[in-house]
Amino acid sequence: MRFSALPRTGLVLVSFFLLAAFFAPLPYAVIQPGDGTDVLKKVINIKGAEVFPSTGKLLVMSVLVSSPGAPVFSGDVISSWMDADSIVLPREYIYPPRIKASTLKAQSDADMKISQASAVASAFEYLGLTPSKAPKVSIALENTGGPSGGLVFALGIIEKLTRDDLLKGRVVAGTGTIDGHGNIGAIGGINEKITVALRSGASIFFAPMENCDEIYNTPTNVKIYGVSTLKEAVLVLHNGKPPRSYCAWHANQ
């Protein structure tokens, strides 16, 4: 069999198409761990009641996801695959078809406001405070949206309004939606958020019970507790034990 070299024009065309393919946008989205923010510093502000100091940190987790309109190139996909903490998924797995980034941001901001209101309501219910006569609580977390900070916001309000120091010098992280009665719901990006907790020095991480089956990231120096209510999370902080075992992996820790 004889092989002949491509003419120079053919080589140029092949090189052009290879480069074009490499730099062409791909229908993927990249998910990677974000940051942990201490909600007890500047995020949660309370007026009209005595606020008690805390000796620890209470972190809300963020996950970075490329927006539906952001181009993702081959180089981005390759570098994300090489990064063990990043995930690359087809864009349609994350976003509805043809959704605009502005629409997504508006929904994310609305979810955050609902989450904050529910966190205040659930914390007040736990503390036995009447909403009409209670202190004024404001929550401000920049460049972050969605409902997953609800559990941590509620714990932060309780920590600030109770004389007992729940954190006892510990770095505690967590995630989970919350309703006005303290029920915790599932969120997305649970394993990425555990990575953020590990990087932020957390020793305790609260996960929604509904997310237990999705968790594969179980670092040995972070205790992961599955909880379904705000009251259960507070009990863990009080005595270091979950009310009952939720996850098979937790039973072996």
Image: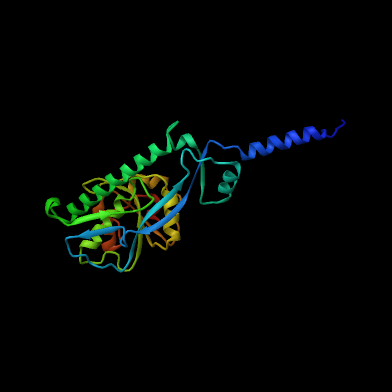
| Image position of 24 with respect to 113: above or below | above
| Image position of 12 with respect to 175: above or below | above
Q: Nearer the viewer, residue 55 or 103?
A: 103
Q: Which residue appears at 70% of the width and 36% of the height? A: 16
Quadrant where the C terminus sits is bottom left
Can I make out residue 106 in this image?
yes
Q: Nearer the viewer, residue 210 or 129?
A: 129
Q: How many marks?
A: 0
Q: Which residue appears at 45% of the width and 58% of the height? A: 219
Residue 190 rendering spot, x and y as whole percentages: 41, 48
| Image position of 18 with respect to 145: above or below | above
Residue 85 rendering spot, x and y as whole percentages: 51, 51
Q: Is residue 45 left or right of residue 170?
A: left
Can I make out residue 217 in this image?
no
Q: Which residue appears at 24% of the width and 58% of the height? A: 157
In this view, the residue farthest toward the right is: 2
Q: Nearer the viewer, residue 90 or 18?
A: 18
Q: Nearer the viewer, residue 225 or 125?
A: 125
Residue 241 rendering spot, x and y as whole percentages: 30, 60
Q: Describe the colour scheme in one phrase.
A: rainbow
Give residue 223's quadrant in the image.
Answer: bottom left
Residue 6 rendering spot, x and y as whole percentages: 82, 33
Give residue 134's quadrant in the image.
Answer: bottom left
| Image position of 186 with respect to 198: above or below | above
Quadrant where the N terminus sits is top right
Q: Is residue 194 left or right of residue 26?
A: left
